[in-house]
Image (tube, grey):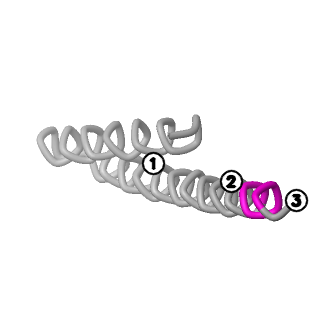
Amino acid sequence: MNKDQVKGQVKNIAGKVQEATGKLVDSKSQEVKGTNLQVEGKVQKAYGDAKEVVKDARDAVKKAVKSHS
């Protein structure tokens, strides 16, 4: 796991809490802010996931090159 995956997940959870709080107190602006934070968190986590895929592929290539040398 990398920091973008962790931070993204934290933002997503915080956004869910903020959205639920907005619903509880009947505040549309808080609901929207919570939803936006969830989207931001999901995007950041997806970016972190992509970074991990690239890192894993890079490591696999390095390993393959090393084993053929």
Q: Nearer the viewer, mark 2 or mark 3?
A: 3
x 27%, y 46%: residue:
16
Q: Which residue is mark 3?
A: 69
Residue type at mark 3: give it: Ser
Mark count: 3
- Please name whichever residue, 52 or 69, is drawn nearer the observer in this view of the structure: 69
**Residue 65 highlighted magenta (yes or no):** yes
Q: Residues within 10 Å of mark 2 (few under 14, many from 20)?
A: few
Disc 1 vs disc 3: which is toward the camera? 3
Span of residues in magenta: 62-67
Residues under labels 1 and 3: Cα distance? 48 Å
Q: Residue at the location (67% across, 63% down)?
A: 57
Q: Residue at x 58, y 42 (%)?
A: 4
Tell me the distance, in whole angstroms, between the alpha carbons under discs 1 and 2.
27 Å
Residue 19 vertical placement versus 39 (above, below): above
Q: Report the magenta stretch's main SS.
A: helix
Residue beneath label 1, please?
37
Q: Position of residue 40 (x, y in %)?
A: 52, 53
* Residue 55 in picture, x, y percent from top left: 68, 53
Label 2 vs label 3: CA separation?
21 Å
Q: Which of the marked residues, 1 or 3, is nearer the chain's N terminus? A: 1
Expressed as whole percent of the image width and height from the top left, the position of residue 67 reads 75, 58
Q: Is residue 45 left or right of residue 13?
A: right
Q: Secondary structure at mark 2?
A: helix
Quadrant in the rendering for residue 64:
bottom right
Say which of 18 and 13 sits in front.
13
Which element carries disc 3, helix, strand or loop?
loop
Residue highlighted by disc 2 = 55
Quadrant of residue 11 in the image?
A: top left
Q: In the rendered structure, are the residues bearing label 1 and label 3 in contact, judged by CB atoms less than 8 Å apart?
A: no
